[in-house]
Image: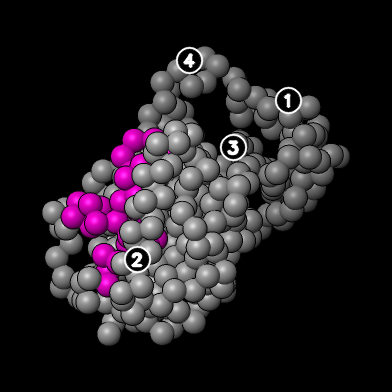
Amino acid sequence: MNAVFRLAVVEDLPALLALEMQCFTTDRLTSRSFQWMITRAHAQLLVAEQEGQLLGYALVLFHRGTSLARLYSIAIAGEARGLGLGKQLLQRIEACAVEHDCAYLRLEVRTDNPTAIALYERNGYRRFALIHDYYEDHADALRLEKRIVQHRDSRSIKVPYYPQTTDFTCGPACLLMAMGALQPGRLLERREELQLWREATTVFMTSGHGGCSPQGLALAAWRRGFRVRLQLSMAGPLFLDGVRDEHKKDVMRLVHDEFTAQLQETDIERMIGTHLDLPRLLQAGGQPLVLISSYRLTRSKSPHWVMVTDCDEDFVYLHDPDVDHSQHRQPMDCQHVPVSHGEFEKMSRFGRGKLRAAVVLSPR
C-alpha cells in the first residue's frame, strides 16, 4: 500500500474520531484526548492517508527518564486491512521511538484479538505479562515488548553476564562480570559473589543489608591481581545522606576510614573530581563498573552498580545485574541495555550531592 505517513494535526480530529468509532467499541479515545496527544503530550500521533482519506493511525507515548516507549493505540480502517498497513505503522513508530532515545517499545492488546496479537508477534514482540480486567468491559490484556535498539558489538572484548543473586550484591555481580571479561573462562560463582560482598560492603545502607562502596570494590579487585582505577567526585564517606541513625553513620565512617587506609597500601589509581571518559577507557580495554541512581529506571531512590559493556555515538550499553529491576524482563533483556548518553549522564549522578563513582578494571 502506497500510503502517506505524517504527524497528525488538529484538523484530523473528525477523521480520527470516525476511525475510532469504526475500530473500537470500548476504551475509545475522545476528541479531548486526541487534541491533547496532538498538541501537548510527550507523544507522537502518526497517521496514514491515501488520496486525502485517513486509513490508520498509531499513537506512541514516551516516558521521560527511561529508554521505554509505549504504543498506546493503533487503528486501521476496514478497507485498508490485510494490505500491510499495520506493519508499516509499527515500523515507523519504532523509528520515532529510536529518535526519542528509546530502546524498548511496549504495548497492551486484548487477549480476544488474535489478529492484532499475530501482527505484533510476527514483528518481533514477545509476551511478558497478562493483566486481568484491564479494559472497560473487563477483558484481559496481554502485555508485549520489543527491544528496538540492538547492541552492535563494536568491542573485541566480550563481557559475560552474571545476574546478582541477592538484593544487595549488584556491585559484586558487576565485579564478577568485569573479571570474567578480562579473564575469559573464569568461573562466575555465587560463592565468590558473596565473598566479594563481605570484603566490599559498607555494613549499612539506606535500608536492608549494606551495599558495596567503590573503595571496597576497588580493593577486592586489586587483591585478585587486577589493575584498578577508582574515580570519584568526592573523597569522603559515601551514602551518609541516606542514613538517619547516627550510630550507623559512625560505623560507615569507620569502614570508610579503614578502606582509605588500605587503599594507601596499594597501587590503585585514585582520581577525584575527574570526568569518566568512557570511549577512551573502553578502547584501552578497561572494564568500568559505574554507580547509578536506580530512580531513572525504577523510581527507587537507591544506589545501584551496573557494568558498562560498550558505547557508540548514540548509546551507552549496560549489563544490569538486577533482573528484578528490569520490569518483567528476562536475563537476556538485561544485557547490553542501551541508554542514551544524556540519560546515562543523569543516572550516573547519585543523590543530592550528585555523587559520581566508577571502578575500572584493566589487565596487568
Q: Earlier in the sequence, mark 3 or mark 1?
A: 1
Q: Give x and y (percent) for residue 360.
A: 39, 72
Tell me whether circle 3 and circle 4 mark residues in contact (CB < 8 Å). no
User: In the rendered view, does 298 fall on the left or right side of 129?
Assistant: right
Mark 4, residues whose alpha carbon is within 10 Å: few (<14), some, or many (≥20)? few
* Element type where label 4 sits in the image: loop
Give me the disc on residue 138.
Answer: 4
Question: Is 358 included in the stretch rendered in magenta?
Answer: no
Q: Earlier in the sequence, mark 3 or mark 4?
A: 3
In this rendering, the answer to whether 117 lies above or below 137 is below
Mark 3 — residue? Answer: 72
Quadrant where the image shows the N terminus: bottom right
Cα separation, mark 1 vs mark 2, equals: 65 Å
Q: Residue at x 29, y 56 (%)?
A: 200
Residue type, label 4: His
* Element type where label 1 sits in the image: loop
Start-end of magenta stretch: 193-222
Q: Give x and y (percent) for residue 175.
A: 29, 63
Mark 1 — residue? Answer: 30
Q: Earlier in the sequence, mark 1 or mark 2?
A: 1
Cα separation, mark 2 vs mark 4, equals: 62 Å
Tell me whether circle 3 and circle 1 mark residues in contact (CB < 8 Å). no
- Residue 288 vs residue 146, the one in the foreground: 288
Image-quadrant location for residue 317: bottom left
Residue type, label 3: Tyr
Q: Nearer the viewer, mark 2 or mark 3?
A: 2
Give me the disc on residue 261.
Answer: 2
